[in-house]
Image (cartoon, helix red, strand yellow):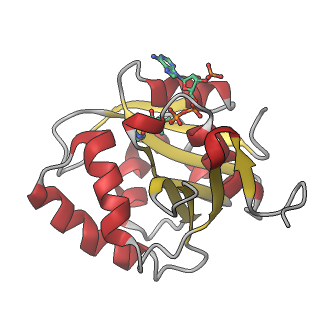
Amino acid sequence: MRLPGHAHRRHPDDIVIGPLDLPARVDEALAVQAVAFGLGADEVAVRRQIVLRHMTYPGARALGATTEGDRLVGFVYGMPNSRGHWWSTVVEPYLRAQGLDDWLDDSFVITELHVHPGYQNRGVGRALITTITDSADEPRSILSAIDIESPARGLYRSLGYQDLARRVLFPSAPKPYAVMGAPLPLRR
Ligand SMILES: CC(C)(COP(=O)(O)OP(=O)(O)OC[C@H]1O[C@@H](n2cnc3c(N)ncnc32)[C@H](O)[C@@H]1OP(=O)(O)O)[C@@H](O)C(=O)NCCC(=O)NCCS
């Protein structure tokens, strides 16, 4: 039985949001990310090692969106931020230049959020990010997104995320990113 407010939430279309054993289902998750975000086989292989390492970090956790047949159609994962993490070391100078690098402390970072294109625009992405941040002890959340007007940027803004820095360049990525931050709990 599923009770209101329980970690498992049932959505229209019989999608269930619940805890995801990401290391065990990393290949399914990366298959979703590959089609949602556009990753080639080489990038998937690199991401696989990164995801498995991330999930060993303190407080790292993941949620999945699954169909009745237990097909994974979306996932989110994140962790309490640490200034020692690679992502933080890249964005820190950009935030510091704006006087906003305190956002790197006491913050829950959303590392990845992806929904299979066949299941987008039904509230699944919104449910994943609000549910994972509702379980965070930190008073705020940060993330990075490609610095264009995308559904992701629209979703994050609607949840209260604001731009902290723009045109952020990651060594491995050709496109610039925006770093965004929001107070928790996220706006509904
Ligand atoms: C971003 C993503 C996870 C959202 O998942 P989703 O399940 O489709 O999102 P939801 O249905 O919960 O929310 C849709 C919201 O996105 C925003 N959105 C959707 N399409 C949009 C568009 N064309 N322009 C602007 N905002 C848009 C809206 O805020 C919308 O909310 P609303 O339905 O209340 O209007 C999904 O689009 C995705 O996987 N994209 C590709 C991968 C990606 O970019 N991931 C994020 C990396 S930072």
Q: Does residue 178 appear in this view?
A: no
Q: Residue furthest front?
A: 69
Q: Does residue 137 appear in this view?
A: yes
Looking at this view, is 41 or 107 the one in front? Answer: 41
Q: Position of residue 101 (x, y in %)?
A: 54, 48
Q: Residue furthest right?
A: 4
Location of residue 60 (image quadrant): bottom right
The vertical placement of 150 against 165, above or below, is: above
Quadrant location of the N terminus in the rendered image = bottom right
Q: Position of residue 155 (x, y in %)?
A: 57, 28
Q: Relative to 139, is 170 on the left or the right? A: left
Q: Position of residue 10 (x, y in %)?
A: 73, 51
Quadrant location of the C terminus in the rendered image = top right
Looking at this view, is 106 or 79 the one in front? Answer: 79
The vertical placement of 146 against 109, above or below, is: above
Looking at this view, is 74 or 69 the one in front? Answer: 69
Q: Position of residue 94 (x, y in %)?
A: 40, 40
The vertical placement of 178 against 142, above or below, is: above
Q: Relative to 11, is 53 on the left or the right? A: left
Q: Residue furthest left?
A: 42
The residue located at (47%, 31%) in the rendering is 152
The residue located at (65%, 55%) in the rendering is 16
Looking at this view, is 105 or 173 the one in front? Answer: 173
The residue located at (65%, 25%) in the rendering is 158
